[in-house]
Image (spheres, grey):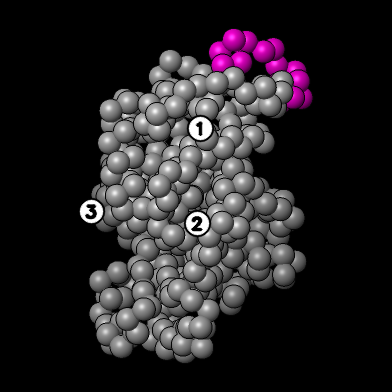
């Protein structure tokens, strides 16, 4: 089955919000063995939505649409679908009962706009929204399917995993999708492509190798459809593993922070962080992992030198002689935060995120990272780029990765 994802909303087109729905749906559906052939975004205009449906049905069997089904005037998806499928809106008492139950559970008052959510196209299958007010609408026509869902991310995710995928699996036989992920670091994308040129040249035609670079890391995805390819998949995994050598960090598609969390739990270690140029981003990433409180104690965001000296007890003389961005300062940061929070491990970073503040000796993108574990220390200087956002994210990735490598996992 070929699937196209269509997102509706002017707010996406003008960059007011980022379309995270499409990325999540594509990853989840691919993991389940479905093929994504296109992702389209259109604004809140009936003619544009209709054209997107025509184009989508010309290349896909199933269209998954999110957005434009709320209670406000700019939510025109239901009206457009009625026009497109030559039907009309009717009142659905079951949808209203579901909305009433939802509002009652949250002690919200009902209003007319919300009540209008119970009007649905006559010629479609209505699937109740488990966590929101706008129902899912399932249209089938001439061998094609369109499913309209809310654009609210947690409502969409609940719909996909709880209703859409189970229905698709019952109705269609999805191809078995075999996938392996390899996390690589310490090499550029172009150099990696040169390194793997022989491997890719000899890769069977039904296999694919995708490069997914992100802030100093590269994820490789080796994939093929059909369980009958499992023996060959294992053979190709071995060849790829051997080709990557010391650049291979892990065989997993988990985020770095999850990999670190796995090590922390397994070894029963505790962790603290001291951050300057990342402004708490390392702590943010670590605490995205459910259960991080088992091993992570906290951070000191010592953005100002006064905070470094008062909270982390960094010596004024050290900062004066070596500068805040130096081996000496990050090593004191790592040591002192670990002592203050009584942790087994620590991460400390200090750098010049930019776009200003650099010097000829320490240009923008200069970062020092210190990791400590079991009273051992690894300190590394990195030279990143001129983009502030990139420098913060690269520093975060390299800091977490440096500790993972240090722990030998």
Q: In this view, does 155 lie to the left or right of 401?
A: right
Query: What range of the chain is rendered magenta?
Result: 101-116
* Label whose residue precedes the other's in the sequence (2 or 1): 2
At 38% from the left edge and 50% from the top edge, which residue is drawn? 4
- Residue 178 vertical placement versus 370 (above, below): below
| Quarter holding residue 132 | top right
* Residue at the outermost top position: 112
At 51% from the left edge and 32% from the top edge, which residue is drawn? 123
Can residue 351 be seen in the rendering of this structure?
no
Give the position of the C terminus as an image quadrant. Answer: bottom right
Q: Name the residue under label 2.
A: 29
Q: Name the residue under label 1.
A: 123
Can residue 43 be seen in the rendering of this structure?
yes
Q: Do the residues labelled 3 and 2 touch (CB within 8 Å)?
A: no
Q: Do the residues labelled 2 and 1 touch (CB within 8 Å)?
A: no
At 48% from the left edge and 50% from the top edge, which residue is drawn? 25
Q: Is residue 385 left or right of residue 328?
A: left
User: Which x, y percent locates residue 327?
Assistant: 45, 61
User: Which x, y percent locates residue 199?
Assistant: 33, 86
Q: Is mark 2 on a helix, strand or loop?
A: helix
Checking the image for residue 360, the label placed there is 3
């Amino acid at each position: 089955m070929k699937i196209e994802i269509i997102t509706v909303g002017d707010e996406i087109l003008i960059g007011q919000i980022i379309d995270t729905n499409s990325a999540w749906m594509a990853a989840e559906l691919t993991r389940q063995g479905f093929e994504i052939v296109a992702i389209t975004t259109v604004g809140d205009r009936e003619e544009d939505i209709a054209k997107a449906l025509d184009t989508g049905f010309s290349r896909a069997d199933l269209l998954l649409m999110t957005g434009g089904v709320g209670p406000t005037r700019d939510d025109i998806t239901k009206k457009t679908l009625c026009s497109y499928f030559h039907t009309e809106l009717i009142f659905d008492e079951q949808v209203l009962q579901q909305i009433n139950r939802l509002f009652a559970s949250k002690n919200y008052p009902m209003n007319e706009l919300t009540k209008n959510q119970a009007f649905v196209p006559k010629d479609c299958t209505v699937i109740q929204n488990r966590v929101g007010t706008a129902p899912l609408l399932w249209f089938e026509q001439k061998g094609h399917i369109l499913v309209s869902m809310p654009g609210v991310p947690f409502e969409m995710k609940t719909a996909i995993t709880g209703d859409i995928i189970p229905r698709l699996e019952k109705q269609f036989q999805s191809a078995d999708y075999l996938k392996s992920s390899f996390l690589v670091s310490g090499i550029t994308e172009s150099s990696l492509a040169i390194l793997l040129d022989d491997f890719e040249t000899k890769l069977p035609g039904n296999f694919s190798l995708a490069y997914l670079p992100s802030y100093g890391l590269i994820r490789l995805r080796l994939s093929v459809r059909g369980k009958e390819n499992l023996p060959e998949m294992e053979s190709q995994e071995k060849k790829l593993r051997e080709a990557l050598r010391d650049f291979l960090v892990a065989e997993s598609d988990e985020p770095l922070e999850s990999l670190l969390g796995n090590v922390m739990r397994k070894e029963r270690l505790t962790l603290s962080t001291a951050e300057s140029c990342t402004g708490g981003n390392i702590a943010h990433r670590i605490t995205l992992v459910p259960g991080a409180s088992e091993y992570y104690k906290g951070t000191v965001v010592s953005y100002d030198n006064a905070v470094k000296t008062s909270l982390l007890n960094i010596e004024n003389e050290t900062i004066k002689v070596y500068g805040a961005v130096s081996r000496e300062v990050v090593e004191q940061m790592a040591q002192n935060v670990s002592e203050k929070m009584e942790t087994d491990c620590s991460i400390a970073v200090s750098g010049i995120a930019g776009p200003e503040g650099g010097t000829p000796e320490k240009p923008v993108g200069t970062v020092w990272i210190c990791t400590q574990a079991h009273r051992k220390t690894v300190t590394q200087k990195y030279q990143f780029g001129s983009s502030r956002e990139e420098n913060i994210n690269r520093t975060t990735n390299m800091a977490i990765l440096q500790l993972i490598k240090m722990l030998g996992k």
